[in-house]
Image: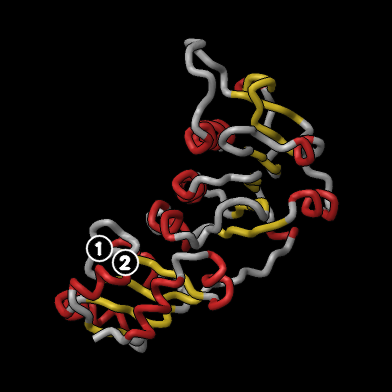
Amino acid sequence: MLSKNQIKHIRSLQLKKNRVNESDFIVEGEKMINELLSSGMIIKRIFATKSWINLNVSKLNLIEHQVVSEKELTMISNLKNPNKVLALVKVDFLKFDYNDLKGITLILDDIRDPGNLGTIIRLCDWFNVSNIICSNNSVDVFNSKVVQSTMGSLFRVNIFYKDLINFFNECPYDRTVYGASLSGSDIKKIKIDKDMFLVVGNESNGISDSVKSFVDKKLKIKNINGGAESLNVACATSILLYEFC
């Protein structure tokens, strides 16, 4: 049975300030938990129905776990339709090193929508892009909607938050910076470097002026029909990564 303190703590993690203060976040759902169990991340406790624990007890090893009812899961879940299992996970603060940025490094400038960030992380996992640099004003990667929409890719892609101006100014090597822009050149006509930075911007405003000043080559996805004004940022990122890879 869940205690009042457990319920209060887990519910409090819906807010970013509490996730930061407690260094905890929530992962939910059978598929996500299976991915989590294979990730090496520190799981503080699993809350699950008796049937789920009985089926998965061999995977839990020394992980603390607690049987809860479906009603109790509803009390602590962020999902409209709570699943059979929820995990309390320690936030993993990755060590950042410029020398680890090989191949395509994706730079996200002020991405605000949780679904977009989650989808982009999943795309990077698909296209073998290991590192994402998010501006400090981008949505928190441990937001429950971001976590769920990654479908487990969160555990295989490195995500860092940086002041992008400082990031570019402090970069110790010369590397071409490509930026997605409606005024750019057709991506199919641009030669792409093997090791590079790709910047995509805010859903409404694109790349900010301060970050735009670091872009060496602006590129765009050619509009075939001429009707739609722009593409969703996650959709555009998928096309760019496909062309780049």
Residue assigned mark 2: 77
244 relative to 28 in the view: left or right = right
- 124, 2: nearer the viewer: 2
Instruction: Point out residue 182 in the picture as x, y percentages from the top left corner.
Output: 64, 22
- Tell me the quarter of the picture where residue 17 sits: bottom right
Q: Which quadrant of the figure has residue 151?
A: bottom left
> What is the x, y in percent for residue 139?
56, 53
Examine the rendering and report whether any part of residue 34 can be seen.
Answer: no
Marks 1 and 2, the one that precedes in the sequence: 2
Q: CA distance from mark 1 to mark 2?
A: 6 Å
Q: Are marks 1 and 2 in contact (CB under 8 Å)?
A: yes
Q: Residue at x 70, y 44 (%)?
A: 195
Question: Residue at the location (56% across, 36% down)?
Answer: 203
Q: What's the colour scheme?
A: secondary structure
Report helix, strand or loop for mark 2.
loop
Q: Secondary structure at mark 1?
A: loop
> Residue at the spot x=70%, y=43% of the render?
197
Q: What label sits on residue 82 in the rendered view?
A: 1
Give the x, y percent position of residue 7: 35, 78
Using residue 170 as the reference point, say whether residue 90 is left or right of it: left
Q: Is residue 75 visible?
A: yes
Q: Relative to 186, does residue 75 appear above or below in the rendering? A: below
Q: Amino acid at mark 1?
A: Pro
Q: Is residue 57 above or below residue 32?
A: below
